[in-house]
Image (tube, grey):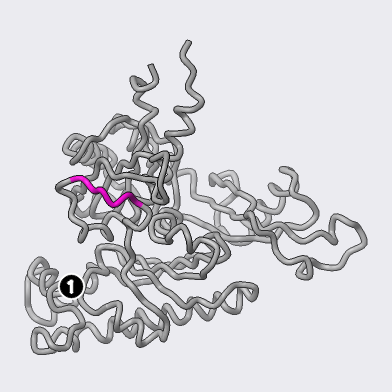
Amino acid sequence: MAFLNPLLNTFGLDIGDRSFKLVQLVKLRRGAKQYRLVAWHEIAVPEGVLVRGEIADIEAAAEHIRKLVGSAKGKLSGKAVVASLPEPRTFIKIINVTGGTDEASLKKAVLAEIEQNIPLPTDDIYFDWQVVDEPAPAEAAPKAETEAAKAPPSRVLVGAAPKSLVDSYTAMLEQAGLAPIAFEIEAMALTRALVPGDELDSEAVGILDIGATRSSLAIFDQGVLQMTISIPISGNEITVAIASALNLSFNDAELLKIECGLDADRCEDKMWKILLPLVDDITEKIHNALRYYKVGFPSGKKIEKLYLCGGGAGFREIDNVLSRKLTIKVRRGDALVNLDSRLPSGFHQDDNLTYTTAIGLAMRAADEGEKRKSSFKLE
């Protein structure tokens, strides 16, 4: 029977340098929020197992995944996973394709774009694309003699990753006893989790993910992820700066960061003096990214809202300080915004930003699982 097939129940797996996280959702048939949380867990990963997204010790990584799955909270089922790929090693971009939307035309345009932007031979990468629902305006199409060329260019979302990276992640998951059914760029999962369903087509938003070892900024506009950019700052770097300035251990500095943060009324404002230069650096890099988007994507909407997520974003007043410096609305993201409000006992809502990527992956996993179940036929 269908429920005995371990590949029909799918969960999301967020693979980070210093932690692995899993989330499983079930798809609800009714209601505006169509997903319910049924399982979750996080496990710390020692330094050196993964380095900037690259698997340095595949046996250790697989063992930690087995521990994660074996100690999951809630009711985890199945062996199929949708897993994340590290942002700095992946490529995603919107391109305009003229002259037709048949597979041959699209593939030719995608290959040309990849060759211009990725410093790897096309034989060494996996890539995929999808036509975005909203095409570019007709007046943006270049003038040409043929009717095909006069048609508005199609907007195509392109994603690519090195084969060596994907193959190593596949081997790690299979060694852990799991079956990867899809890999996804982190930014895709983040936007799926954080952007409310009623805002998908109405607003242009930025998403700043401050992770333990790396950070990234994604721009979501016109119903699609438009661009991502790495931000060279991380939650651990911020903690190390505090530890060094105050002569504290890393763990004590982490607690102080969360408790005091950028609240000038706490900790005798000493944290403010330490963190402000780092926040100014983050602000400048975000400004540069937003300026690049305005110039490089003239048809895009103005970015007036920025969501914060990731474990490194969990300290006081970071949202208010960035809002003042960027002169846009900055708010902490809510990774539960698209989930049913009935949460399992034991799941702490305060942890939702830590699980943002895993939740976004789990949303896709739930959708994929439903497709597999609907196509399953009893012999």
The residue positioned 25% from the left and 67% from the top of the image is 312
* Residue 249 makes an appearance in the image: yes
Q: Secondary structure at mark 1?
A: helix
The residue positioned 80% from the left and 54% from the top of the image is 99
Considering only vertical position in the picture, is 281 above or below 115?
below
Left or right: 202 as drawn, with respect to 175: right
Q: Position of residue 159 (x, y in %)?
A: 54, 52
Q: Position of residue 259 (x, y in %)?
A: 12, 74
Q: Position of residue 47 (x, y in %)?
A: 20, 54
Q: Residue furthest front?
A: 31
* Residue underneath mark 1: 240
Q: Which SS does the magenta portion mostly show?
A: loop
Residue 27 sits inside the magenta stretch: no
Considering only vertical position in the picture, is 367 above or below 256?
above
Q: Give, as a single range, the part of the protein colored magenta.
A: 339-344
Left or right: 139 as drawn, with respect to 189: right
Amino acid bearing label 1: Val
Q: Residue furthest top?
A: 379
The residue positioned 60% from the left and 60% from the top of the image is 94
* Residue 243 makes an appearance in the image: no
Q: Quadrant of residue 348?
A: bottom left
Quadrant showing the N terminus: top left
Q: Residue furthest right?
A: 145
Q: Quadrant of residue 218?
A: bottom left
Towards the viewer: 267 or 35: 35
